Image: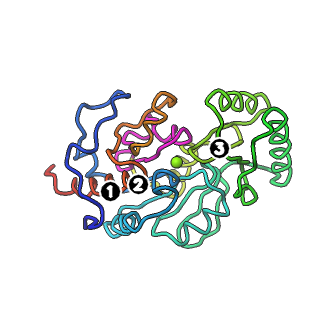
Amino acid sequence: MPNAQCPMPSPQSLVPNPQSHMPKHLSLTALSNIRLVATDMDGTLTRRGKFTPALLQALEDLAAANIKVLIVTGRSAGWVSGLSSLMPVAGAMAENGGLYFPPGNQKPVVLTSIPDLAKHRQHLAITFEKLQTQFPQIQESVDNRFRITDWTFDVAALSQDELQTLDYLCQQMGWGFTYSNVQCHIKPQGQDKAVGLLQVLREYLPDYSPEEIVTVGDSPNDESLFDRRYFPISVGVANVLEYADKLQHQPVYITTAAEGEGFCELSSYIFQSFHIPN
Ligand SMILES: [Mg+2]
C-alpha cells in the first residue's frame, strides 16, 4: 500500500541526474522490479538528524510489500546493533561496509579481515594522534568507542582542502579515508559500502539480481553505491547535489525532496511503479 503520510510525487518529480550519463527519462518499469532497497541513514533516512513518523511508515509499507530495506551506514557497530534491532528493516551494515547485522538479532559479521582487533584499534588510535598533530582541532566522535573496524572524528568545519589533506595523510600511513555529512572515517584500505554490500548480497541474499536492487545515499561515503557497474539503479536524495562535483560516481536519479523526505518520495515512486503496465 502506498504510504498515506508521504506526499505522492508526480511522475516527473524523481528526475534523472543531470551530472551523469543516464536515460533521459526515469523508467518506472525499472523501479517496478525493485525488491531490495540498500540505503544510507544519516541525511538519507533522517530529517535534520531525526527519523520522522513518515519515514518509519514508509519503511513499514516497504516491508509489508515484501521489499527488503537494508541500511548501509557509516555509523558505528554499537549504534547500528541497537538501531537495526528496533527498526522495521531486513538487516543493516555498519562502519561503511565493515560489519553486517543480519535480521533477527543474529550474531554480527565482521566483513573486513582483521586478524587482531585489539592491535587494529591501537593502530587506528596512533594514526588519529598523528593526524591531530597537523589538525589539533579534530575531535573523536562520540560513537567512536563503539567501533570495531574504523576510527571517526567529526567533520565539523573542515574545508574541502583540509579533507583532501587528511585523505592524503591517511593513504600515506596505509589507511583509507572517507567522510559524510557528519563524520570523517579512518578505515582499512579497500573497505567501502559497495564492497561490503556486494559481499552481503553474495553470501546472504543471493537471490537478488542487480536490476532488483536500488541503492540510495547523500554523501561522498555513498559514492561506491552509485557505481553503476555494480548497482545500475541508484538514487541520491536532493541534498547529494551539495557534493555533485566531488563524486567520482553519480547517482542515476535524484529526488526532488531532500533527506528523509527524498527517501519517502522514492518509496512512493516504487509503489506507483507497481501500477505501470509492463
Ligand atoms: Mg549520509
Q: Amino acid at mark 1?
A: Ser
**Crowdedness near tag 3: few (<14), some (14–19) or many (≥20) residues, C-alpha within 10 Å:** few
Local secondary structure at mark 1: helix
The single residue placed furthest to the left in the displayed view is 277
Label 3 element class: loop
Amino acid at dot 3: Ala
Residue 86 horizontal side relative to residue 241, left or right: right
Q: Position of residue 97 (x, y in %)?
A: 60, 49
Q: Is residue 74 above or below residue 77?
A: above
Q: Nearer the viewer, residue 80 or 191?
A: 80
- Amino acid type, label 2: Val
Q: Circle 1: is it few (<14), some (14-19), or many (20+) Cα within 10 Å?
A: many
Q: Which residue is mark 2?
A: 37
Tell me residue 48's x, y (percent). 49, 55
Along the polypeptide, which appears first: circle 2 or circle 1?
A: 2
Q: Which mark is residue 267?
A: 1
Percent from the top left, x then y, of residue 106? 60, 70
Q: Is residue 83 left or right of residue 110?
A: left
* Numbered disc in front, either 1 or 3: 3
For the record, the magenta segment spans 210-235
Residue bearing the label numbered 3: 156
Viewport quadrant of the N terminus? bottom left
